Image (spheres, grey):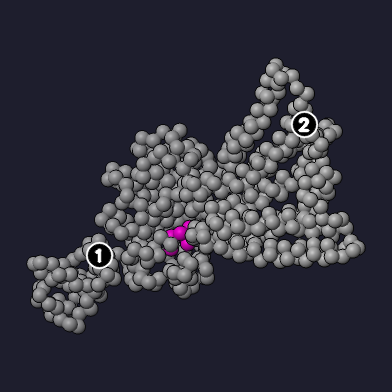
Amino acid sequence: MIKKEYRDIYKTALVILSILLVIPLIYIFDRIKWKSDTDYMGIFIIALGAVIFLLANRLGVDTFRTELEDNAFEYLLTLPISRSAIILDKLLPRLAVIIPPVICYEIMILLTKKIQWGRLVISDFFIFKPGYFPFLVILFLLLSFFTSLFRKRNAVGLLTAAALIVFAVSGFALKALLGTVAAPFVQANFTGMSFLLALFVVDMIIGTAFFVVFRKFDVKSLNQHSEKFVLMALGPLILVSIAAILILLISNNSSTPL
Amino acid sequence: MIEIKNLSFAYEKTKVFEDFNLSISKGKVVLITGVNGVGKSTLLRLIAGALIPDKGKILFPAEMGKDPRKKIGFISDRLSLYESLTIDQAIEFHLSFYDVNRFDDTLINHTKVKRTQKIKELSMGQRTIFHLSLVMACEPEILLIDEIIHSIDVYLREIFLQHLINIISQREITVVMVNLNFTDIEGLLERIILLKGGNILVDENIIGLKQKVRKIVADKIPAELPLLFKNNTPQWTEFYVYPFREDFRKDINGSVVDLDLTEIIKAFIGREYT
């Protein structure tokens, strides 16, 4: 199963990563024609970081693509393999594909001191910081992975949107809880820990709902399973967002930090 | 061999089975039939593990191991496989779940498929034969065949059935088939189960059932005879009687006709529509 999964995804990974080839091509063109002093290495590293997020999303979203497109769920579920082994066999190749580019990114960003675009220090954005980047990529991949089975259902689209809102709101709330003032999302020297934790909480909620539903997953209508999944995930997400909003309100009204 | 106990299953709000019980002995060839939508294919999917019962249990003998699916071969009417794989890749993928590494391609050689062809490029018949080969490579103890035989051409159907006959004669394999056309498979069957409204309406061995159902061609029959189904043709009226007893003959003013399986099932199913 792992071999098949790997075969299914490595081409996708190559296609997505090949987007980056544009940058060396522009660099060559620049050397010949414009001779500007643009920091192409910096652009390449940031582009690599962005493409890795794109790849993580694609790999996650495509988790059950072949089963859905080939109508192969019935076949898969009648094979002697447990539901948890199916998840593991799908997850491991995805991690194996995403980890090498992440390592490349980490090495490159650590070797580069600062990546700037005008006055904006892009390398200071928490999502590009080497300490947060790998965790954010993996959590992002997991979020797409957990919602992939039901991705064509409207309710799941709403759920994903809700999850991202909860991620943002609870990120600010956690930051407030940690004693700092809620700051604009894009700001230099921004601490990413709050958002990393917020994404972890969102992943835990959606992941738990996915595991519970997938444990009893069968070839009944996908809508039926999808409904169960949305209902299971939505309750805790609403509770977390209410708690986050309350924390934000209290911390904004209070003169002393929480 | 297969023990279904107090099984309940529903698709959303449509109940299919409630407190359903059935046992199928080892080595028997059983036909499950009934009107469309009665739950025949659902029952096979429940046994195969593609569907999970809402309540109740499906028990298999301990010797089938922790995961009985290892010993179950299922050929569904959807012919569900990874269509984007080539035949070679599909074989490698399938066998990797079983402790088997040998694939007998005698059967698929009849279908003129190439091992490099993708599953989606195969015709219905080729896919069915390939699916049977794939399933049989893993030497299942239980073979579940959904209503697929009659969607393939006569030549491949014969190959399929011949192979099935060979398997049944060589090994003690339990075969559960779902079908609505019985002419080709009548010789294979030992037991027939007719479902109605999530319950078993008829559960008989084939020989016994053939003795119990008779067609009477007459103007009328005595009211006390257990009438199963009445069919009016332009020329005469056919009365299907079940259960038929030999002593009924003295009261009948007409001819009593022995029936083949197709006609018997037609009578049972016809009754559901009248």
Q: Residues within 10 Å of mark 2 (few under 14, many from 20)?
A: many
Q: What is the x, y in percent for residue A236?
A: 69, 65
Q: What is the x, y in percent for residue A3?
A: 59, 40
Q: What residue did someone put label 1 on?
A: B266
Residue drawn at x 40%, y 60% as measured from the top left? B41
For the residue pair B231 and B185, the one nearer the viewer reads as B231
For the residue pair A249 and B76, the one nearer the viewer reads as A249
Residue B26 highlighted magenta (yes or no): no
| Dominant secondary structure (helix, strand or loop) of the stretch shown in magenta | helix
For the residue pair B97 and B248, the one nearer the viewer reads as B97
Residue drawn at x 32%, y 47% as measured from the top left? B152
Tell me: B34 left or right of A107.
Answer: left
Secondary structure under the numbered disc 1 in the rendered image: helix
What amino acid type is highlighted by mark number 2?
Gly
Secondary structure under the numbered disc 2 in the rendered image: helix
Tell me: B244 left or right of B197.
Answer: left
Q: What is the x, y in percent for residue A48?
A: 71, 35
What amino acid type is highlighted by mark number 1?
Lys
> With respect to residue B56, does A95 lie above or below?
above
Q: Provide the chain ID for the residue under circle 2.
A: A
- The answer to whether any part of residue B21 appears in the image is no
Residues in magenta?
B43-48
Q: Are marks 2 and 1 on the same chain?
A: no
